[in-house]
Image (cartoon, rainbow, N blue to C red):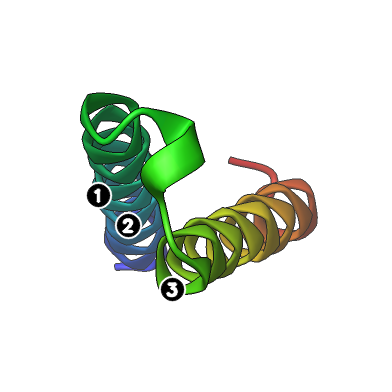
Amino acid sequence: MRQTELMLFYEYFLSKITHLENTYNLVIRNMRVKDFKNCDEVDFLDLMLIKRELDFTIIIFNDLKSLLKL
């Protein structure tokens, strides 16, 4: 049972990280289409928030991975 729980944590964080990376890349792509000069503050704030959430998720994932020895 413990191994199953560990794998669920692992899969959850990997899927969350993948989703955030895809969202981040989509925002960047949309900003490139607008040509960065024409982007407003909301675009940059979205980008910063997604990047921050991605960074924190990766940090938590790595900490959990080391604690659980995945």
First in sequence: mark 2 vs mark 3: 2
Secondary structure state at the residue bearing disc 3: helix
Secondary structure state at the residue bearing disc 2: helix
Q: Which residue is mark 3?
A: 42
Count of marks placed on residues: 3
Q: Residue at x 37, y 35 (%)?
A: 28
Instruction: Determine which of the numbered discs, if any, sits on residue 28 in the image.
Output: none
Q: Residue at x 71, y 47 (%)?
A: 62
Instruction: Indicate the amino acid at tag 2.
Output: Lys
Secondary structure state at the residue bearing disc 1: helix
Give yes or no for contact between labels 1 and 3 (Cβ–Cβ under 8 Å): no
Q: Quadrant of the C terminus?
A: top right
Left or right: where 69 falls relative to 7: right
Along the line of sight, which residue is nearer the eye, 53 or 13? 53
Q: Which residue is mark 1?
A: 19
Where residue 24 sits: x, y (%)?
38, 44
Q: Is residue 38 above or below residue 48?
A: above
Instruction: Indicate the amino acid at tag 1.
Output: His
Give yes or no for contact between labels 2 and 1 (Cβ–Cβ under 8 Å): yes
Instruction: Indicate the amino acid at tag 3.
Output: Val
Instruction: Determine which of the numbered discs, if any, sits on residue 16 in the image.
Output: 2
Left or right: where 51 falls relative to 1: right
- Report how far apart the C-alphas of labels 1 and 3 lie in the structure: 20 Å
Along the line of sight, which residue is nearer the eye, 56 or 52? 52
Q: Residue at x 78, y 47 (%)?
A: 66
Q: Quadrant of the N terminus?
A: bottom left
Where residue 59 sits: x, y (%)?
74, 55
- Report how far apart the C-alphas of labels 2 and 3 lie in the structure: 23 Å
First in sequence: mark 1 vs mark 3: 1
Along the line of sight, which residue is nearer the eye, 58 or 38? 38
